[in-house]
Image (tube, rainbow, N blue to C red):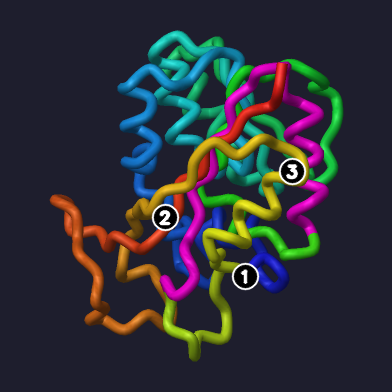
Amino acid sequence: MSDVMDWDSAYRGDGVFGGPPPWNIGEPQPELAALHRAGRFRSDVLDAGCGHAELSLALAEDGYTVVGLDISPTAVAEANKAAQLRGLATASFAQADITSFTGYDGRFSTVLDSTLFHSLPVEGRDGYLRAIHRAAAPGAQLFILAFAKGAFPAELETKPNEVEESELREAVSRHWTVDDIRPAFIHANAPAMPGVPAEVPYDRDEKGRLKFPAFLLTAHKPE
């Protein structure tokens, strides 16, 4: 998807989605919100591909220090504006190429990837995983939430680079120690999914959003 996607246009609301990407649901993805409630995250936190930064903002409200990086200047501006309006001094956001960014060596105890990995070109994955590894402190935890292979109709011309479990494990394990990969869900606003049939064989959550098959990976950087 990211090979052809103009992400800044998407976040301006004049792109293919006619609004924000549909998996930006106005709150953190439920899979990662559950980990937050369970106390799985430690400051400082990197929100890789933060978008409108619902996850970063929720963490900052609970006292975490969070840095969000995104390729879209529109998304970054909106995230910074939201943090200022809420008085969240521990959240900051910057534009960056997530596959090659520098300047945070060894800083982060937690790295969060909420629907970014599958949005990268396949050839950009290794640079991304290397960059976030460089930014991570020894012992840091990595969490990746990504669409599973088959989440979208095969005939769609433009769709995310969905992953097989083995594919995700192999890519991440080049730089990180993988601890767990389990089936999960990405919640998305169905009306904004171009090319997705109105009736798809997926459950909906209590707010009517589609629950797309996904994987949740947990990994760490050795001490």
Snapshot quadrant of residue 122: bottom right
Q: Of the two numbered discs 1 and 2 on the same chain, state the one appearing first in sequence.
A: 1
Return the residue at label 3.
129
Snapshot quadrant of residue 6: bottom right
Mark in front: 2 vs 3: 3
Q: Is residue 6 above or below residue 142?
A: below
Return the residue at label 1.
1
Circle 3 residues within 10 Å: few <14, some 14–19, many ≥20: many
x and y, in percent, of residue 50 in the image: 57, 39
SS label for mark 2: loop
Magenta region: which residues?
A: 124-151
Q: Is residue 83 above or below residue 144?
A: above
What is the total number of numbered labels drawn onto the structure image? Answer: 3
x and y, in percent, of residue 2 in the image: 67, 65
Can see residue 142? Answer: yes
Image marks 1 and 2: residues in contact by CB distance under 8 Å: no
Kindly identify the amino acid type of the residue bearing the numbered disc 1: Met
Q: Of the two numbered discs 1 and 3 on the same chain, state the one appearing first in sequence.
A: 1
Label 1 to label 3: alpha-carbon separation: 18 Å
Q: Is residue 58 above or below residue 182?
A: above
Label 1 to label 2: alpha-carbon separation: 14 Å
Q: Is 144 covered by the magenta stretch?
A: yes
Tag shown at residue 173: none
Tag shown at residue 23: 2
Kindly identify the amino acid type of the residue bearing the numbered disc 2: Trp
